[in-house]
Amino acid sequence: MGTNFLRLVASSLALTLVVACDRTPKVDNSRYAPAIQHLVGSTPAWVDGDKAGSTLWKVERDFYASRDNLPAWIDGDKPTTRLATLIDGLKASEDHGLNPARYGTDKFEQTLALAKQNKDRLDVAKVPELDARLTYAYLKYASDLLGWSVNPKSIYEDWIAAPNKVDLKENLAKAAASDNVRPVLGELAPRHPQYEGLQAALQRERQMPTGHLDEIRMNLQRWRWMPRDLGERYVFVNVPAYQMQVIEGDKPVLAMRVVVGDPTHQTPLFSGEMTTIVFSPNWNVPESIIRKEMLPRLVDDPGYLERQDIQVVGTSGEVVDTEAVDWGDESAVSRLHFRQEPGPKNALGLVKFQFPNPFDVYMHDTPQDALFNKPRRALSHGCIRLENAVGLAQYVMRDKPEYTPEKINEEMNAGREHAVPLKEHVPVHIAYFTAWVNPDGSLTYTDDPYRLDEKQKEQLR
């Protein structure tokens, strides 16, 4: 009995000693709080002086305030594992076609190298600024992964990037509470097979250069401008490839050639939702086409409008006798509207697909089938002409069982306009990718009809 008691006491003492030896003294980082609070209270010179920089600095200020201005990456005078993974994450920006030097990785590595020479101890006087710089580098890289740092409007006025709204402070807090920062940063990058395929191509290009490094980097950036969620099913138009696809679960279920805007009437780039299909559409001729193309033709060919089934409509909606119009009277002509009636001659063909947008562009059928045989099809006034409009109509109407193929054909040839709201809206993405990943991982490089590669390349330098 006594022996067992002594053994129990001895075991308890040993366990107590092990636990006591295992305890790491808690580091008091509160000594840094006043300096960090003072630092983030103003805007240091190393913060970018543009709107993006001030936005990120506000996030940083709020982040430190939420943690009582304690450092996020350093404990006492020692770098944390988290700091090391942050630097690794910043260096991995190369995998996304970005430049690690933009985030100061070299200086951070030099600081860690000096600390290593001093038994892994940092200069405590420099800890507040170092921690703040690391946080700003994180936010800057996060912003780049989200596509926020460069506005595509600087390349093409009618290019609208997806907002990709993310709570950066929340993401930063998650990283600061993690032992491995890289996966948290990875949550911000696009998760799309094309993006991942371009990343793989980027690695191959660096190992065996073929002269396409800039094209790959630019197209990675364009994916960062795309919505993170494209939709379970969506319509995807790639302007430089002159192609449209309907995608379900990352797989194309319908594909066709398209005609897009010519270089002087460029198709805008944006994401929207298809809401309506219009059978046997009228075409209200845009004023610019009337002025630049139709009026000069009418001088020599007054019968042109009648042959094309185009009516001239007055301000009250009345049909005007074209023979009574003085086509030389610009003031009188400017008050007239031109409307092409439904039918086989209609410029919109037999069906159009509407997705509300500020540019008033849409997709539509066309009577000019021969255009789809041309290799370069930047030929329209901005709208998108479809090679197989019937196929798209059948696809988007599949949620309306009463619209059988026969019913759709009947509506398309009815000779009267009929708009049908879609039961389920379909996301539409009009994009501009000049490097496309094939199923085998190889890349296809396309035409650059709007010379946007040239403009974007200037930003890579």
Image (spheres, helix red, strand yellow):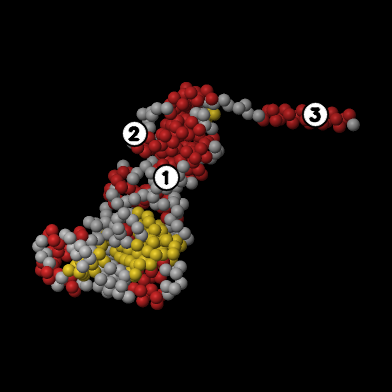
Q: Residue at x 42, y 68 (%)?
A: 397
Estimate the x, y position of residue 11 in percent, counting from the top left. 79, 31
Q: Are marks 1 and 2 in contact (CB under 8 Å)?
A: no
**Label 1 vs label 3: CA separation?**
58 Å
Q: Residue at x 38, y 41 (%)?
A: 99
Q: Which sits earlier in the primary sequence, circle 1 or circle 2? A: 2
Up the image or down, 363 lies above or below 116; here it is: below
**Mark 1 neighbour class, 10 Å CA radius: few under 14, some 14 to 19, many 20 or more:** many
Estimate the x, y position of residue 105 in percent, counting from the top left. 43, 35
Estimate the x, y position of residue 277 in percent, counting from the top left. 36, 66
Up the image or down, 26 lies above or below 187; here it is: above
Q: Residue at x 42, y 27 (%)?
A: 41
- Residue 109 or residue 73, whichever sits in front: 73
Residue 126 appearing in the image: no
Residue 248 tag number: none
Which residue is denoted by mark 1 in the rendering?
145
**Secondary structure state at the residue bearing disc 2:** loop
Badge nearest the viewer, 1 or 3: 1
**Secondary structure state at the residue bearing disc 3:** helix
Work out which quarter of the rendered image holds the N terminus and state it: top right
**Mark 2 neighbour class, 10 Å CA radius: few under 14, some 14 to 19, many 20 or more:** few
Estimate the x, y position of residue 38 in percent, counting from the top left. 44, 25
The quarter holding residue 282 reads bottom left
Which residue is denoted by mark 3 in the rendering?
10
Q: Residue at x 38, y 73 (%)?
A: 408
Work out which quarter of the rendered image holds the C terminus and state it: top left
Amino acid type of the residue tagged 3 in the rendering: Ala
Amino acid type of the residue tagged 2 in the rendering: Gly
**Label 1 vs label 2: CA separation?**
20 Å
**Mark 3 neighbour class, 10 Å CA radius: few under 14, some 14 to 19, many 20 or more:** few
Which residue is denoted by mark 2 in the rendering?
49
Badge nearest the viewer, 1 or 2: 2
